[in-house]
Amino acid sequence: MTVTRYPGNFRIGVLDGFADGVGDPLPCRLDPKFQILVLLAGRQVFHLDHHRIELDAETGPHAVMMHLTRSCTLRYAGSWGDPFRKIALACDCDWINQLMGEDGTRRGLLESPLGYVTWRPDTEIARLAVQIVAPPPTETTAQANLFRMSRGLEILRRCLTDHLPCGAPPTADPVAETIRLYLNRHLGHDLSLPRMESDLGLNRRSIQRHFTKSFGCTLRDYVRTERMARAHRALAEEGASVHQAAHLAGYGTVANFSTAFRRIYGVPPKDMRNRSI
């Protein structure tokens, strides 16, 4: 993997080649850090101490975000792909703690000394990752590195926003936090109670009780709010159409979506497109 270091010890690694098996079977020691891996093509399995992490990009990009506040042992179990393509973003834990603020460091992923979460990145994160692998032609290496850094920081922002939203109140209930992170990872999928019961191993009454007690809102209200926020970002930052945004927000018709969007944000969704700079 080719790694570029930036000010503040922000690192971006790129690997685009062929992999078939275990390149280095010897375990190595990882120092504390915050890291995001986005696998664009191929499959990889590795262990952090006794935690097994598997990324499979055969059906689409797969990613893992890790917060390591203590040293741990890394052991690769195998990498496969032709091509095998991935990016890695890394920075010091203190850097992330400062970005998230005091409240952010006490929640979810950042709460554990060896925390991680895997998920299927959305199309925008995948697009940014591809641009890091293959930036547009530039006159100098410095320009290419600056381009990669801007994309890497945007991926970092989106990942922290999606998985550690600043608006969520802190909670001492790990079950409730597990439920919240599950909801954030599956906003674009079926979130029926039967599926949640199966995936989380909890009955619906327990799911609803833990979540409502910790966050002060129902599952339905939380999902509706998060989906609408995702639609807002898609309109303002990604140039999505109103129809696409309505789909992201979970609405069957553009008319119903537009009414709900205007009630929340004070403007119709068509006026929100590409507002961000």
Image (cartoon, grey):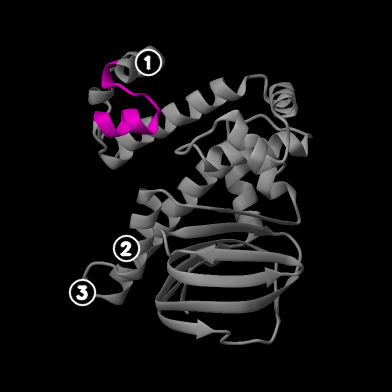
Give the CA separation, mark 3 to mark 2. Answer: 17 Å
Instruction: Judge left or right: residue 158 versus residue 64.
Output: left
Label 3: element kind: loop
In primary-sequence order, the first of circles 1 and 2 is 2
- Write the residue at 30% across / 76% down: 141
Q: Residues within 10 Å of mark 2 (few under 14, many from 20)?
A: some
Task: Check disc 3 and give the amino acid type.
Answer: Glu
Numbered range of the magenta stretch = 242-255
In primary-sequence order, the first of circles 3 and 2 is 2
Find residue 232 and report its horizontal and vertical position in percent.
37, 30
Label 1: element kind: helix
Label placed on residue 131? 2
* Residue that carries the numbered disc 3 in the rendered image: 139
Find residue 253 and report its horizontal and vertical position in percent.
29, 21
Task: Check disc 1 and give the amino acid type.
Answer: Ala
Find residue 162 and report its horizontal and vertical position in percent.
51, 42
Q: Is residue 246 magenta?
A: yes
Give the CA separation, mark 3 to mark 1. Answer: 47 Å
* Residue that carries the numbered disc 1 in the rendered image: 260
Do the residues under discs 3 and 1 have CB atoms within 8 angstroms?
no
Task: Check disc 2 and give the amino acid type.
Answer: Gln
Q: Nearer the viewer, mark 1 or mark 2?
A: 1
